[in-house]
Amino acid sequence: MTELDYFQRLKEKVLLKYQEQYPFFQGNWKTFSSQDIQNLIGLIEVQCKQTISEKWIYTHLKPENNSKIPRKDMLNILSEFVGYSGWDEFTFEDKTIVVESQPSSETKKSKKGILLIGLIVAIGITGFIIYNKNAKPEAQTIELQNEFTNENVNSEEVKVYQVNDSTKTELKVNQGKVEVINSSYTKTKLVIQSPFYEPKTITIDPKVPVANPVQRIDLKPDDYAMMLKAFMVSDIKNWQTRKEQLNQILSDNLEVIVMLKDDLGAEFFNKNEFSQKLIVPSESLKKMKIVEIKNDASNKIQFIRIKQE
């Protein structure tokens, strides 16, 4: 084999290594997208502590045929990525010396038996792969409820992410329910985030059957965040009482960021400025939506991010 042949085999191994981390990619170098390239660069940086440029990948890995092999230092990086110490070990391990001798009749029978067993195993594996490929992934409905009221949470106030390996996908929440489809038939994680509820992560195992088609998940509300939400949408009745309550739930070091419409930037408010807005509410206040809340060590609200609607 020539060095170009070895390089071609190395490219195949790199692609297989990439698919271990991103199993949903089932293409080849020709269909390797710009996002796949960025993912590969990140994997190499983490595993090999080395950097390969996007241009280099387009020049040497994307082409179906190469007229010459790249520099050896780059070959060493790719060889290390697929499990070798470098290019020299890769080419050495890939070489095989076959010594042929005249087989006896018993040897021929033995080889035929081995080939027959191998053929049966291959047919079984192929059938299993085809079955799993054609099988329709089962969907599971997750219902998100307030732990104390047993009511479904407001869909606009919660975000749910499905995490498989290194991929994170946001799922659509409708009427407090979210549908999870696990196409990989492996354990998947759901990360639930909300400014008004404590964050929660659950694991769904498709191998474990569930008793009900709808699984209920209780979310524990953040009391201070809930009070703040009520202040922003309710009409004032006793401004002195509200002022005292705000002083109890807001940190003295409070920072409030209001993101303005039409990408016009943001406004900053401290505790006194923001409290004044809540004590004397306006129509513009009711059009503000809380998107992030952070508490300090004493559980008082220390940071608020608001989107202007």
Image (tube, rainbow, N blue to C red):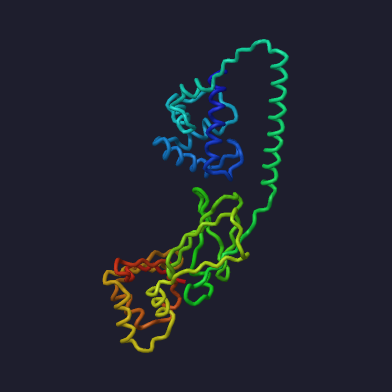
Number of disc labels? 0
* Residue 235 percent across, percent down from the top left: 42, 85
Q: Is residue 100 above or below residue 67?
A: above
Q: Residue furthest top?
A: 102
Q: Is residue 176 above or below residue 108?
A: below
* Residue 193 percent across, percent down from the top left: 46, 63
Q: Residue furthest front?
A: 106
Q: Is residue 307 visible?
A: no
Where the N terminus falls, by quadrant?
Answer: top right
* Residue 229 percent across, percent down from the top left: 42, 76
- Residue placed at 60% from the left, 53% from the top? 207
- Residue placed at 44% from the left, 69% from the top? 197
Whether residue 249 sits left or right of residue 1 in the image: it is left
Closer to the camera, 31 or 177?
A: 177
Q: Is residue 149 visible?
A: yes
Q: Residue furthest bottom?
A: 237
Q: Is residue 96 above or below residue 162?
A: above
- Residue placed at 55% from the left, 22% from the top? 4
Dividing the picture into quarters, in which one does residue 122 lie?
top right
Q: Is residue 170 above or below residue 225?
A: above
Closer to the camera, 194 or 52?
A: 194
- Residue placed at 39% from the left, 78% from the top? 227
* Residue 221 percent across, percent down from the top left: 43, 72
